[in-house]
């Protein structure tokens, strides 16, 4: 299978010292759905900006659809589509007019553009609102329009930067369906960044988890989940006692780690481990504040790999106005 | 390139016609200047004081054209700052459209829109001269086709150069505060070192020396010489002033393209 995206030791340094991307090497095959998952400031948007020719890398190499992004930026831009994390549609234009401008900027002849726009408006269920000004659109409609603008020229590779940022869970699930249909219909290669673990799990065939500009793990969502090695029982003592020696001796415990004051006991089946853990603690005279069973998930992978809890925060915005609009809509920063 | 340019020009037009408050205010403000300021400050004097214009209002009305073009062009860059804030410029930059198109489309549209109120003011000033109780512009020269052409081209060149400069600032600067800071800094010196509003003999000699080379003055001189047939009051013919203006325009547009290119540069 041909590689759609290849990066080798990609580096981006801001202000001489901030290594937003710190030696990332990835390969994405043609037609694959690949995700970069990580918290805010992990370097995801910087990666997308380099791959979409909006930023020049400080070091390393990035090849998109066989073309080096720094040597052939214009040709790369012809072959890729991009949906930004904040809507870039012009609120004073209708949805259709926004798409017409986007098609014009891609150099698509008018008759072909009209046909393509009609199809996209239907596909994204925006046809009834096509001739309304975008400033009256809901958040979900704006995201769908952003996606339509990104694919108006039928790109070979589609970059989605935090595509469901700011949407409620229902809107997010609905948007995933549009992306699934789009992939099914066009076979487009998908490169997605997200800080929503569920989104990465739902949409991506392969993932790379990034933190502080580096890849900390890569694989299919299932492979990554398996890295946590079964269930985890999380035990919190009421008075901060050291439980390591007590928990290590419980039959079935495969290892004990302490993260942020919580003892994490690895085991095959969490349900079977809870009674002996509680009994052992009781015998040792330790009062427990809580005992939880955690099934393998990307949250757990992230915690295991980085030693930090994963917080689903709102992502970065693209400009001062977008930032304010985000705040007005109740987005957290 | 034409397809990209026409798509962006259409966007500019759609945004313009959907902002009626802006259309009305941009046309009304210069008219109010002409009626309130122009009528109130109609100093006594004749062609000798007003570089060949028969009275101050005629002198002022021609000057208003330069003033209006300058003022209107100040807003060009503000639109870019807002487009940048909303991610619209980023979207355009992410397309394969030539970078020059992204600069040219607002330049062409905004320049034409700056000329509209300028010529409206000129027409209204001529009309006012025929309304009892008002003073207006009295054309004493024989403008002719060539003169009319010279006037239109001079105003177009002035509009292009100022719009290019302020658009470049819009592309280069990040915040509205920085942009309006720069605009505020440039606006008054450009206007008040020109001969657009005050006649010769008012103010010190050094100011008139500067005014002689100010691009607004050069444009307005082309207008006044043609409208008032007042060659004897000027050191040079309208064509010389026109070429002076053109030299300024080349310098400003080159500077604007350098600034714009840097701001729109991608790998």
Image (cartoon, coloured by chain):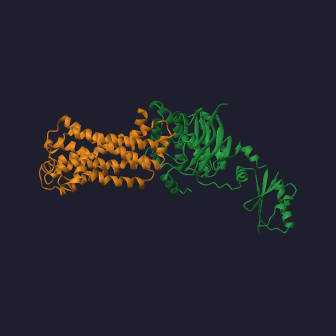
Chain colours: A green, B orange
* Nearer the observer, A100 or A39: A39
Which residue is found at the position 82% from the left and 61% from the top?
A: A244
Visible residue check, residue A243? yes
* Nearer the observer, B190 or B34: B190
Answer left or right for B200 relative to A325: left
| Quadrant into which the N terminus of chain A falls | top right
Answer left or right for A263 relative to B212: right
* Nearer the observer, B230 or A222: B230
| Quadrant into which the C terminus of chain A falls | bottom right
Which residue is found at the position 75% from the left and 50% from the top?
A: A296
Visible residue check, residue A131? no
* Nearer the observer, A140 or A6: A6
**Rendered location of residue A132, percent (x, y):** 45, 45
Answer left or right for B218 relative to A44: left
**Rendered location of residue A101, percent (x, y):** 45, 38
Query: Vertical placement of A100 versus A226: above or below?
Result: above
**Rendered location of residue B235, percent (x, y):** 18, 43
Find residue B256 and report its image quarter.
top left
**Rendered location of residue B20, percent (x, y):** 34, 49
Answer left or right for B133 relative to A50: left
């Amino acid at each position: 299978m041909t590689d759609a995206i290849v990066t080798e030791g990609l580096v981006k340094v801001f202000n001489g010292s901030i290594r937003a991307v710190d030696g990332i090497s990835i390969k994405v095959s043609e037609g694959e759905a690949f995700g970069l998952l990580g918290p805010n400031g992990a370097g995801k948007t910087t990666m997308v900006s380099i791959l979409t020719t909006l930023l020049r890398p400080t070091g390393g190499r990035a090849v998109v659809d066989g073309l080096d992004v720094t040597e052939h930026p214009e040709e790369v831009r012809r072959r890729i589509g991009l949906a930004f994390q904040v809507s870039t549609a012009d609120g004073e234009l209708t949805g259709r007019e926004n798409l017409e401008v986007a098609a014009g900027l891609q150099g698509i002849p008018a008759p072909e553009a009209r046909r393509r726009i009609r199809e996209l408006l239907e596909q994204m269920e925006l046809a009834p609102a096509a001739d309304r000004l975008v400033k009256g659109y809901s958040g979900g409609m704006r995201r769908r329009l952003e996606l339509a603008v990104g694919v108006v020229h039928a790109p070979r590779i589609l970059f989605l930067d935090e595509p469901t940022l700011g949407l409620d869970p229902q809107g997010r699930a609905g948007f995933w369906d549009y992306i699934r249909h789009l992939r099914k219909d066009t076979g487009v290669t998908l490169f997605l960044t997200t800080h929503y673990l569920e989104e990465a799990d739902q949409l991506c065939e392969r993932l790379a988890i990034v933190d502080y500009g580096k890849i900390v793990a890569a694989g299919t969502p299932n492979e990554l989940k398996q890295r946590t090695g079964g269930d985890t029982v999380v035990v919190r003592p009421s008075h901060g006692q050291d439980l390591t020696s007590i928990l290590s001796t419980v039959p079935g415990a495969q290892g004990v780690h302490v993260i942020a004051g919580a003892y994490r006991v690895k085991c095959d089946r969490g349900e079977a481990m809870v009674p002996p853990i509680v009994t052992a603690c009781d015998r040792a005279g330790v009062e427990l504040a809580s005992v939880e069973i955690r099934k393998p998930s990307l949250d757990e992978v992230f915690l295991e790999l980085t030693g930090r809890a994963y917080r689903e925060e709102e992502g970065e915005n693209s400009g001062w106005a977008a930032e304010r609009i985000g705040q007005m809509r109740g987005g957290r920063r | 390139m034409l397809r990209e340019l026409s798509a962006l020009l259409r966007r500019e037009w759609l945004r313009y016609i959907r902002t009626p408050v802006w259309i009305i205010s941009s046309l009304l403000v210069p008219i109010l200047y002409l009626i309130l300021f122009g009528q109130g400050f109609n100093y006594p004097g004749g062609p000798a004081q007003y570089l060949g214009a028969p009275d101050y209002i005629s002198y002022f009305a021609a000057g208003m054209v330069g003033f209006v073009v300058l003022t209107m062009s100040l807003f060009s860059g503000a639109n870019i700052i807002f487009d940048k804030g909303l991610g619209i410029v980023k979207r355009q930059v992410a397309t394969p459209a030539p970078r020059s198109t992204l600069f040219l489309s607002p330049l062409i549209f905004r320049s034409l829109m700056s000329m509209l109120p300028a010529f409206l003011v000129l027409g209204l000033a001529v009309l006012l001269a025929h309304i009892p109780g008002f003073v207006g512009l009295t054309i004493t020269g024989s403008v002719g086709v060539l003169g009319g052409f010279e006037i239109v081209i001079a105003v177009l060149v002035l509009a292009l150069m100022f719009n290019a400069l302020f658009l470049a600032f819009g592309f280069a600067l990040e915040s509205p505060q920085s942009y309006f800071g720069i605009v505020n800094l440039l606006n008054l010196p450009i206007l008040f070192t020109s001969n657009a509003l005050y006649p010769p003999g008012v103010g010190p000699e050094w100011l008139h020396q500067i005014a002689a080379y100010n691009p607004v003055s050069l444009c307005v001189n082309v207008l006044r010489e043609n409208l008032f047939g007042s060659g004897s009051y000027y050191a040079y013919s309208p064509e010389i002033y026109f070429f002076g203006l053109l030299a300024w325009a080349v310098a400003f547009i080159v500077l604007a393209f350098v600034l714009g290119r840097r701001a729109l540069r991608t790998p």
